[in-house]
Image: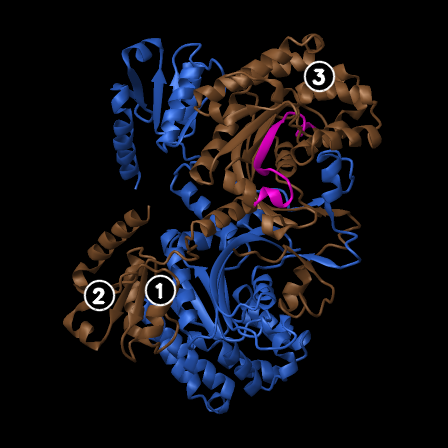
Chain colours: A blue, B brown
Amino acid sequence: MLSFTMEYFLKMNAQETLTGKYGEEGSKLIYDLEDQGGELLSLRYDLTVPFARYLAMNKITNIKRYQIAKVYRRDNPAMTRGRYREFMQCDLDIAGEYDCMIPDAECLKIVAEILTDLQIGDFEIKVNHRRLLNGILSVCGVEEASFKTVCSSIDKLDKQPWVEVAAELINDKHLSSQVVNAMEAYLCSRTKIKDSSPNTALIEHLRLDSLLSANEDAQTALKELSLLLTYCDAFGIADRVVFEPSLARGLDYYTGCIYEAVLTDEFIQSEINEEDGTVGSVAGGGRYDQLVNMFLQKGRGVPCVGLSIGIERIFTVMEKKLQKERKRIRSNETDVYVASAQKNLLLERMKLCRALWDQKFKTEMSYKQNPKLLQQLQYCEDRCIPLALIIGESEIQRGIVKLRTVPTRQEEEVPRDQLFNVLNERLRRTSTDNS
Amino acid sequence: MLSFTMEYFLKMNAQETLTGKYGEEGSKLIYDLEDQGGELLSLRYDLTVPFARYLAMNKITNIKRYQIAKVYRRDNPAMTRGRYREFMQCDLDIAGEYDCMIPDAECLKIVAEILTDLQIGDFEIKVNHRRLLNGILSVCGVEEASFKTVCSSIDKLDKQPWVEVAAELINDKHLSSQVVNAMEAYLCSRTKIKDSSPNTALIEHLRLDSLLSANEDAQTALKELSLLLTYCDAFGIADRVVFEPSLARGLDYYTGCIYEAVLTDEFIQSEINEEDGTVGSVAGGGRYDQLVNMFLQKGRGVPCVGLSIGIERIFTVMEKKLQKERKRIRSNETDVYVASAQKNLLLERMKLCRALWDQKFKTEMSYKQNPKLLQQLQYCEDRCIPLALIIGESEIQRGIVKLRTVPTRQEEEVPRDQLFNVLNERLRRTSTDNS
């Protein structure tokens, strides 16, 4: 997989990297980061906050958009698991004043559709609601000022067992063990529900809970989650969705439902997750109704819901799966290779390439003037290019082209005026064979 | 056109932008740029230098790749002409030890193919060779140490008349007027060639020039340019290519042939170029055989040739063209809109959307629980969505769907089990009408 150098340059020695490459005029335009009027700069951490800022700056009241771009985390990279300091995020967000949980359900549908289409095995989408967490913390006796820092600890529950998180809450966040025990009863309640429809049963269990039933945040959240599940059912993804009261997601800006997609395929679990004990979280998101507000001097910001997909993580999983299935990963899309059997046929190869390019065939040829036939054919086999066209003096004179099916090494003669049709037919056949 | 905020943040007031949004764990990972171990940082100026650095760091000996990403110039932005401080570049590069001018010709073919497919009117691709420029400067008496700074002035010839450039060469670059006059004879020789095949005639004219005929750089360059033109002919783009001895391109890293694509459509010229007197340069590139070397401690770097397309510039041109033709620019790709004629049909709309999504129809619906029919249909007309499906209680009971052709407002009833076929057929018809 290609991984390019970071988008900014380490100019440890200016002579070595940037200067002396862009010329006189260019050098004036290089964007040095140390001296832009004394402003403090940071690299983009995610795509959500910039999106919210964009909405605020441009006074946009509704938009649905996706964005695929790089973000930066000053984290410890773990290459083998697809965790880098610079990585791609694929985000989709729906901004606008809409009715409760309808765009939220569409976000879950989109996550489910993408993960299904990618064929990376089974997955589930955990859902929860920030106001339910607030309600639980509140009835357990956590002070409102500590909600965010406590949520940040709860967020580690996908990587750490409850006892470790509980210890952190008591030792670092200074909660009493009584409060932490009370929290456990709610946060770990999922495992205690034995029911054929555990999502509904768990919502009902919490709704009727003696303490939560009097908490407005919790009741609103449970009502919204119930609606979300109904919509997920209409979208045909109810079996993918798991209501998980301990799901917290660390980001401060979420205000409503939150979700996280996790790969549950056994092979993935054993291959990737056990390396560091984490589950294979590959997508996440939630509702953030106040974030746009934070960029406005006055007026009301637009409510938003969105999702983010970790593409490097998914690529790592896909590569490991292909390795396991002993499938070769093709790193090119070339369908047709134009080869020559003799010397001095460069211009003929070029003309044939041109004709194929004009017909939108994905074609390449050697960049050598007089390449050896064997080397050209070897190139096709190494790169899994399905078809090769071979021309020589006699073929040109006879108005034909030799068509070689690379995997079988079979060759046949095709009249030049039937070439496009024959290629189209062969490529259709190849793509059917592979699917 | 969407234009997102810059990839880095101006943290003028940390409270306002980044902090308090990513939570406790996240805040630790924000990549501040002022204090990474005292390193000096710059934003990426182009994609070529990072590509060369990538090849050097990973010891890659051959690769052909494209990349579409953002770059930054601390320039004066000019929004109306599609010139921004942050903008996208689309680059293609071919790296590897290959035979002379073969990958270079493919780069020109690719530029021509892209500009042709985009239908933005006539264009020409100016070509020149760095070693020809060196040869010309050398025989005119410019010292080798001044080649780069002199080329940087010559590069302005597409925006400034010769007299201005000559003045800069004499006043700022301290060349004698004798030297500058000698340069003019060569650099402005294109206009003096009256021949049915001016490229060939001009090469011949320079090849036989009394001074240049003894200059190795110039002779090599002319031989290579001649070869390049032969290959362009085989690729069917000879009529697009114009040999222009004054084309300089400001970047220091070019070592061989250089090229620049210019829009020559009259409408484009009058609409866009005259605003600032520049020609509509939309793509450029060239050979840079020494750039990878500069990142290596030892060993030989890989020779490269590449091209870069200015996509914002092209978008600006396309938008002005569409405006002129009074064509509306559709900002969505939705083919089918699912609407309801009565209240309480949200779940039915969701189920129909799901069925259409599963069949890969580009579908959307209102995010309101009970949207008004008129508002839904208005939405379709405003957004140029071609087809709307309308459901009501009676339609559901009768197992049919009402299909509305949005532009004509005609409606027909389609049995539910024939819906996909009918939609496919209608969409085929629509796309034929539009093309």
Task: Give the residue displayed 79% in from the left and 17% down from the top.
Answer: B141
- Which chain does the numbered disc 2 sit on? B
Q: Mark 2, residues whose alpha carbon is within 10 Å: few (<14), some, or many (≥20)?
A: some
Is-magenta flag for residue A402?
no
Which numbered disc, 3 or 1, marks the residue closer to the eye? 1
- Percent coordinates x, y for residue A30 in the rendering: 72, 44
Tell if the residue under mark 3 belongs to the same chain as the one under mark 2.
yes
- Percent coordinates x, y for residue B144 in the rendering: 79, 21
- Which chain does the numbered disc 1 sit on? B
**Which quadrant of the view contains residue A53?**
bottom right
Calculate the distance from the C-alpha at mark 1 to the C-alpha at mark 2: 14 Å
Q: In the drawing, what numbered circle is on residue B381?
A: 1
Q: Is residue B125 above or below residue A111?
A: above
- Percent coordinates x, y for residue B339 in the rendering: 30, 70
Q: Is residue B406 above or below residue A429?
A: below
Q: Which residues are magenta?
A: B272-293
Task: Give the residue displayed 66% in from the left and 74% down from the top.
Answer: A297
The kind of residue tagged 2 is Glu
Calculate the distance from the C-alpha at mark 3 to the C-alpha at mark 1: 62 Å
Q: Quadrant of the C terminus of chain B?
A: top left
